Image (cartoon, rainbow, N blue to C red):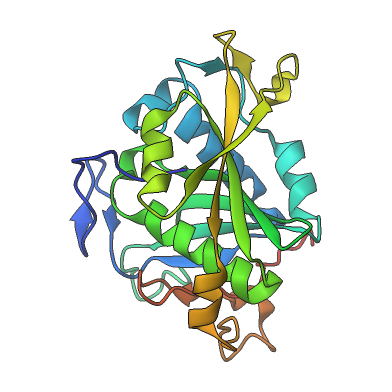
């Protein structure tokens, strides 16, 4: 997950971080493909685990060691029909005339899972630590909610958050999520999800009713690029916090 704690600066077009990267209004969000798996793993690990994560406010380094996920897990989930990963891509600097397609830099990601009873599950939410607090998390969360409504007709979004992460829970609450009475146990003993540094870890369940968003969207279709039918790997859309869209899942040679 990402977003600034209270008092942190929000993003604006042309905001430059300490490493020289600029987050601009040209941010795009797209559905990821298998070719993005390694990038997604590195992004999630950098946001939650180890010393790199301490550059941002979403770090769990004091709560958990080990890994947050791995390449095998993400690759397997990218192949499941009930799961979508979305990635936020910042525009690359203007290339030289003969540089070809410069692509962009993946700066954020999240995972959606379609569940029963009109529920979508939201997780694997990460933004590069040095770019947190620039509005990328807001854009990804809004895109995920819109995807869940338009593609899966979801009525509710839910997520698990470590109960000790008070600032993270508050971030979601400011965006319309509520803390339910449900709790889920932390998977102690399964080091695929980390090595606990404390004995009191557990998840609280947050949710948000998406029916109001669905009513506002009405019969709107999920936006696609005009060339999607001929070039499915070009399914991306510009992101504006007030007009967020996605294209198709990106394909790679391994899909």
At horizontal 81% and vertical 61% (from top left) the residue drawn is: 81
> In the rendered image, which quarter is residue 160 located in?
top right
Residue 188 in view in this figure: yes
Up the image or down, 12 lies above or below 146; here it is above
Instruction: Say which residue appears at 41% left-offset and 36% top-offset.
Output: 168
Q: Tell me if 231 is positioned left or right of 62 in this view.
A: right
Q: Going 44% across and 28% down the picture, which residue do you hit? A: 165
Image position, residue 117 (x, y; %): 76, 60
Q: Nearer the viewer, residue 21 or 226?
A: 226
Q: Nearer the viewer, residue 84 or 130?
A: 84
From the viewer's side, name the closer residue of 92 and 146: 146
Disc tally is 0
Q: Residue 163 vs residue 231: left or right?
A: left
Where does the C terminus fall, quadrant-wise?
A: bottom right
Q: Position of 229 compared to 101: left or right? A: right
Instruction: Name the residue rendered at 59%, 77% in the picture.
Output: 234
Residue 7 in picture, x, y percent from top left: 18, 41
Q: Is residue 104 visible?
A: no
User: How far from the left and from the top, in percent, is residue 240?
Assistant: 36, 72
């Amino acid at each position: 997950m990402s977003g600034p704690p209270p008092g942190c600066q929000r993003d604006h077009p042309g905001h430059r971080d300490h490493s020289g990267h600029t987050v601009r209004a040209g941010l795009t969000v797209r559905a990821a493909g298998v070719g993005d798996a390694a990038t997604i793993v590195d992004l999630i690990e950098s946001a939650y685990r180890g010393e790199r994560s301490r550059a941002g406010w979403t770090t769990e380094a004091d709560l958990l060691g080990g890994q947050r996920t791995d390449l095998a897990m993400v690759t397997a989930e990218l192949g499941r029909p009930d799961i979508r990963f979305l990635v936020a891509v910042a525009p690359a600097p203007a290339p030289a005339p003969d540089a070809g397609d410069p692509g962009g830099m993946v700066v954020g990601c999240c995972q959606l899972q379609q569940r029963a009873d009109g529920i979508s599950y939201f997780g694997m939410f990460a933004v590069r630590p040095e770019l947190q607090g620039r509005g990328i998390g807001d854009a990804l969360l809004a895109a995920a909610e819109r995807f869940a409504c338009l593609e899966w007709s979801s009525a509710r979004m839910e997520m698990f958050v470590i109960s000790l992460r008070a600032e993270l829970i508050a971030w979601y609450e400011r965006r319309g999520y509520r803390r339910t009475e449900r709790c889920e146990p932390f998977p102690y003993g399964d080091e695929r999800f980390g090595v606990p540094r404390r004995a009191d870890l557990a998840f609280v369940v947050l949710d948000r009713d998406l029916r109001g968003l669905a009513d506002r969207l009405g019969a709107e279709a999920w936006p696609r690029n005009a060339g999607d039918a001929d070039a499915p790997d070009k399914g991306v859309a510009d992101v504006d916090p007030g007009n967020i869209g996605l294209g198709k899942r990106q394909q790679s040679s391994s899909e």
